Image (spheres, grey):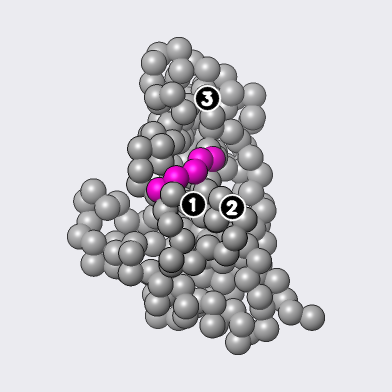
Amino acid sequence: MTTKLDLRKELKHLYMPSAKAPVLVQVPPMHVLAVDGEGPPGGEAFQAALQALFTLAYSVRFAAKQELDLDYPVMPPEGLYWHAGGGELTAETSHDQMAWTLQMMIPDQVPEDFVERVQAETAAKGKGGPHLSDVRLRTFAEGPSAQIMHIGPYDAESATIARLVAFAEEQGYQITGKHHEIYIGDPNRAAADKLKTTLRLGVTKVE
């Protein structure tokens, strides 16, 4: 019998927060397919990494349904961003100075050796591009975080981020996590002013 996981419903509070006000959440450790890189978000390396991530995510999902009797939806892509040189990431940071991790959550029930086998088989078919071999299965532990839904273009996130930081500080927290974006909307399908992006920042209580 096939086990069906309604991840979008189970994790709705972590992926679809309100756009009206920031909230504090506790993010449990999650298994993610992840690939690292540097350079402009949306640039050539970024797009190639995203292609590899999507290719493997769908390949693993289809194989899991066929071989593991496990049915689940492919989850939204996520991006973690920081300054490649170790400085503070601000709105003025050049895109060429940015480092990032692209990732997609997959169920804990999918074993690492299963992912590796599907990855090798997908590469043998010539799918996923040159970055397919760079994708790794990791455990991502974000823990306590502040988050909010941003609706609008990516380059208009500054005001929403400022609200998020101010909220965290008002609650007695300091920002300790990387800038985290979860892409609920597809920029190839939705108008820029209607794009939905969950913004999340890991936080630590100020003692």
What is the C-alpha distance between the residues marked 1 and 2? 7 Å
Q: Considering the whole magenta stretch, tell me its main secondary structure.
A: strand
Neighbour tally class for label 1: few under 14, some 14-19, many 20 plus, Cα within 10 Å: some
**Which disc, if any, is residue 133?**
3
Q: Name the residue nearer the viewer: 203 or 115.
A: 203
Residue 16 on the magenta segment: no
Q: Residue furthest right?
A: 207
Residue 39 on the magenta segment: yes
What is the C-alpha distance between the residues marked 2 and 3? 25 Å
User: In front: mark 2 or mark 3?
Assistant: 2
Question: Quadrant of residue 185 in the image?
Answer: bottom left
Residue occupying image coordinates x 79% and y 81%: 207
Residue occupying image coordinates x 72% and y 76%: 205
Residue identified by numbered label 2: 85
Where's residue 147, x and y in %?
Answer: 51, 70
Answer whether labels 1 and 2 touch (C-beta < 8 Å): yes
Residue identified by numbered label 1: 97
Question: Which badge, 2 or 3, comes first in the chain's sequence?
Answer: 2
Neighbour tally class for label 2: few under 14, some 14-19, many 20 plus, Cα within 10 Å: few
